[in-house]
Image: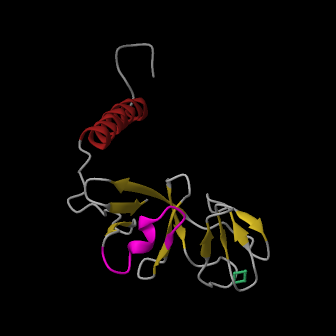
Amino acid sequence: MTNNSTIDRKDFLKQVGMGFGAIMLMNCLQSCSETEIPDPDPIVNTDKLDFSIDITAAGNTALQTKGGFLVVGTKKVIIARTLSDTWIAVSSACTHEGTTINYRASSNDFLCPNHLSTFSETGAVTKSPATSALKKYNATFSVNTNTVRVFE
Ligand code: FES
């Protein structure tokens, strides 16, 4: 730039360019922050396990007794009613080689009959050869409907 009131071409373009760039940056920042378009078809995770069973129905009556258990094969879940009348649900396939596990009321844990791995009521491995925990689910009982709900 010169000392008088004139401006040379190079300085003019530099100033105009910086001004234009600043305006474009502001527009971009505003449009990015203000016009977020909602997803019209959001993906909802429907894979979460959530089912209920009636303990008075044929085939489910083992759960009418404290200490009883039931394997729901279609869901790959074992539901146990503890001796203290609480409800437990974990994945029924042993994490070693997939054998269906059993519930042991006296020790309140799960036993795999294949290679004798054991799992706690939370699904944690308490005896190998299994090394991975069973998946634990929430289990609630409704006295009004005589149903156990198992869900994630
Ligand atoms: S399959 Fe369960 S311990 Fe091997």
Residue shown at the point (38%, 34%) measured from the top left: 9
Q: Is residue 56 left or right of residue 133?
A: left
Q: Residue at x 64, y 61 (%)?
A: 108
Position above or below: 112 against 52: below
- Relative to residue 96, is residue 49 drawn left or right? left
Quadrant location of the N terminus?
top left
Q: Position of residue 3 (x, y in %)?
A: 45, 13
- Quadrant where the C terminus sits is bottom left
Closer to the camera, 114 or 43?
Answer: 114
In the rendered image, the residue lying farthest to the left is 40
Q: Is residue 116 left or right of residue 151?
A: right
How many discs appear? 0
Q: Report the residue at 71% width, 86% height from top.
A: 114
Is residue 119 on the magenta stretch? Answer: no
Snapshot quadrant of residue 34:
top left
At which x and y percent is residue 30? 29, 36
Majority secondary structure in the magenta region: loop
| Figure quadrant, ligand 1 | bottom right
Magenta stretch: give its range: 57-69
Q: Percent from the top left, x then y, of residue 11?
A: 42, 30
x and y percentages locating residue 37 in the rendered image? 23, 50
